[in-house]
Image (tube, coloured by chain):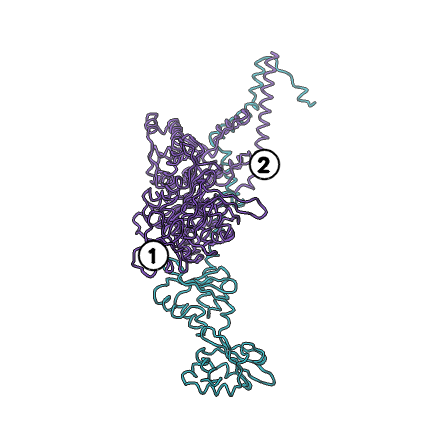
Chain colours: A purple, B cyan
Amino acid sequence: MRLFSWLVSLVRLLFYTGLLAVGIMAAAGCLMVFHISRDLPKLPSPLSRIIETPQSLIYAADGQVLIALGEKTSVSLDMVSPDFLNAIVATEDHRFFEHHGVNKLRTFKALYITLFEPGRIEGASTITQQLAKNLFFSFEKTWQRKFKEMLVAFQIEQANTKEQILEAYINQIHFGAGAQGIERAARMYFDKPAQDLTLAEAALLAGLPKSPTQYNPFRHYDKALARRRVVLSRMVAAGFLTADGAAKTDALRPELHDGRKDARTGSYFLDAMIQELVKMYGEDVVYHGGIKVYSTMDSRLQADARTVVMEGMARLDGLMGLDKGVKEKPQAALVAIDTASGAVKAMVGGRDYYTSEFNRAVNSRRQAGSGFKPFLYYAAFRDRKLHPASVFQDKPVAIPIKGAPDWYPQNFEKRYRGPMILKQALIHSVNAIAAQVVADVGPAAMVDVAQACGVKSSLKSVYSLALGTSDVSVMDMAAGFSTLASLGICHKPFLFWRVEDARGRVLFEHIVKDRRVLDAATAFQVVDMLQGVVDFGSGRGVRRLGFKRPAAGKTGTTDNYNDAWFTGFTPSLCVSVWTGYDKKKKLKDKNRRGITGGRGAVPIWTDFMIRAMKNEPVRDFLIPSDIRYEIVGKTTGCLAVPRQNMADKADSPQPVADPAGTIRVALKKGQEPCRGY
Amino acid sequence: MNLRAQNWHEPGTPGEWFKRICSVLNLAIFSVTCIIVVSEFRFDWCERLVGNYLSFTNDTRPENGAIWDAGRHMVNALQSLDQMALARENAGRTVRTADSFADLASKLGPGEWAKLDKERFRALYLSLPPYRRRNVVDPVRLVWLLNGGATDRIFCEGRMGGMKIFFIDTRNRVVQQVDLDVQALGNKGRRAVIPGSLDNAPDFFGRIYPASLFFTAVSRLPGDMRSDLILNTEDLLSEKGFLDRVGVGNSAQDGFICLGFEFRHLGESRVVEVKAREWAVWQLTLVLRGEG
């Protein structure tokens, strides 16, 4: 009896205590609502206001839309596949049509787990709560934020129908790859409107909002399919789908839209351009201003650039014996510039944008190696009475440096050839002669020439600059060589022609200004030497791989084979290619031989040029009027045959070098080779 | 201890316990509690109540959060764009209303640019004194630029102390660039009056002649040359005082040479400088030296 009495007292105590607690909680809740609601954000009315930001459009040179920034394409529910609506409701909030903003049972369960199972956090957000969070709140996980989110969810539910809420939700959630809203996602991944999505596609998309990056089908197709399996099972559990139907759908592998994938891979170009636009106009204008930007990107060349870099990297992986499992692989970058204007036609900043968004074409600075020598020879021809037929000794040299130990530059092949003319020295990239020339001319002259040509990176005025020891970007090299290609006329590289506001008013227009920075004839002498590099020297792989048009260029390989370059040009297009590891690491083949610019970068350059110049007319480099060709001895620099003045006899055939020890050089008026014949 | 507590006694039997538990008060409290909880789960009245309250206070609450921030970004962006467009329109208006290149250059701020249509350029160019035109663009070249189809558009861009004019072809390439200085443009070639005598002007040193000698020499020039020597005599005619001496400048600029006319008035001297045709001046100099 006493026990019974005690039990009844206990129950009674508990009941009244509970009642009191509930009362106190209710009062506290009311006070909190009153207190917190003052700081709650105002709700826009109608909810569809969330899609009113105008989109900024970026066009390729051919008028094709490359990307729409801040694009939110809103569609009504009847314009969306019912399969998608079922899938998203089943996955995110299967009681969506029953609750009033909060799923109380799930919330209590989540609260219990969070409080009593340390280390586990259970989410219980309904679609309405997610909408509230996305519209108004940050992603910090605090109970205040959750409480506010819940209150706003109540208001959203009170002020809108379920259909309006669902419509707002599906039009603002992120699906990855820059796609916000279901319509954009459907077009991005499957190139079709949202209403035409099949169950297999709809279920795949419905799985993405949980983690758009982790399940991005372009990057992780298998993970996206695994996530779709979860979506399908929830659809079965919610009664939207039979188990049999789910199994059949699970077996399907929807085909992704490749065109969009290409456009995003061009993002190295777009990223660089957006970075520049933001610098000019600020983020608000670029992302929210609805501007139109007409870029210089040639879609065809950009696609070619992407393909050749991918193929070149696959080839390099094979050469280096790197299989698929290797995590750290070499990277590549490519920049193509129109020599007549400075317009950047294509840019690739790495082997795969999805793996690494770091743009090596503009943001990475690496030593250019021998690729920097053309600037040295121009400075030598300009400041000293030197010319391509001047003779130097290829021998071990010691260059005295004030206040420092002597400099002992070594040839790449560690052997010395004796006397040779400067054209031969550049063709064979002889370091010992480059060192003698820089000691004579001075590094400051070389810095002056490189900067005049458009190299923007800061250069160290030291003797070793002749061997390319200063860090430069791929864009720098392309710009610098482009100035040589246009025989001394410098065009600042640029990424867009025009910027307009939404009403078509022109905000910016790029004007091509020709700025003569080099003497045309002297620049031509360097170009002629660079043609020799492609025809007979370290860049002859270009010819071996089948590019037969007039071309000039220079390879560059740094000590320890950390960087392999080739920068070259035709009269109309200048392209620089870099390959190497992000970290300082040697490029070595399977036999542990170092990979030079000729083996690493030349194949990529050549592949690109063959594709880029297809259907273009063959053009030769323009010969300035005060240039004449002479055939001279490679080692003596003396005339091998009687002179033929090309300027005087314009229709006479150009002299052709005898393979046995002679070579053709371009000389200016007043420059005389020695007369040995 | 209150009276009720003093009078309270423990029920003796289970039946009494049951009676007490199922008292009207207990049942009422329990039922109300159950109704409240069940109705909340069934009808979500609590959420609706809060929702209604928040809807009621919606207009009094701040516009903050991601969606409002985005709206603000958009407003900022549109305002910035409008300002840019307005600045461009103002520059365009400046171009349309400017009465000379000097006026245009002084009104265009550094970095500000505007389109200049060919007719407008032609009008401003022709408003320049003839000897100034060559400074802007060579007249023959201008004929090619404006009439030969080499130019698609003309832009002018303000800079510190002047402006640049770009003649652009259809490929946005600059075919001709002109750099104009406000100071140089401001001197429209009209007379410059310098206090003092010709002796203080080194430009005329050794080439100063009495006015009578000068005009005698002028009268000996052929008629067409005489009329072409000084294009505008208005400045000289309007000058008060007695013309005492004339100096001939030594350096030619754009086909013109400066002549200095020294006037005396009320005991003070001043020199009026005017431009004269180079070829006519050299001919006049020969006459003055007795060689012509």
Q: Chain of mark 2?
A: A
Q: Which residue is mark 1?
A: A642
Of residues A409 and A71, the one drawn nearer to the viewer in this rendering? A409
| Residue at mark 2 | A31
Q: In the image, what residue type sits under mark 1?
A: Pro
* Rendered view: A310 above or below B153: above
Corner quadrant of residue B254 = bottom left
Outermost residue toward the top in this view: A1
Q: Which residue is at the far front?
A: A677
Q: Residue at x 49, y 33 (%)?
A: B45
B136 w.r.t. A215: above or below = below
If the image is split into quadrants, where does the C terminus of chain A sit? bottom left
Query: What x and y, as percent, mark residue B82?
Result: 47, 56
Give the SS element for disc 1.
loop
Vertical side of A53 occupied by A24: above or below: above
Q: Is residue A624 left or right of residue A583?
A: left
Secondary structure type for disc 2: helix
How far apart, in angstroms, are the residues tagged by discs 2 and 1? 105 Å
Label disc, if present, on residue B201 of the rendered structure:
none
Q: Nearer the viewer, residue A66 or A383?
A: A383
Task: Give the label, 2 or 1, closer to the camera.
Answer: 1
Q: Position of residue A186 (x, y in %)?
A: 36, 39
Residue plotted at (43% across, 85% down): B221
- Find residue B113 and report its horizontal and vertical position in percent: 46, 61
Residue neighbourhood size for the residue with mark 2, other residues' Cα within 10 Å, grouped as few (<14), some (14–19), many (≥20): few
- Mark 2–mark 1 contact, CB under 8 Å? no
Q: Does any portion of residue A212 appear in the rendered image?
A: no
Total numbered badges shown on the rendered structure: 2
Task: Using the image as rendered, state which of residue A576 and residue B106 is in the foreground.
Answer: A576
Q: Earlier in the sequence, mark 2 or mark 1?
A: 2
Q: Examine the rendered structure and indicate whether residue A187 appears above or below residue B222.
A: above
Residue A637 pos. (x, y %):
40, 52
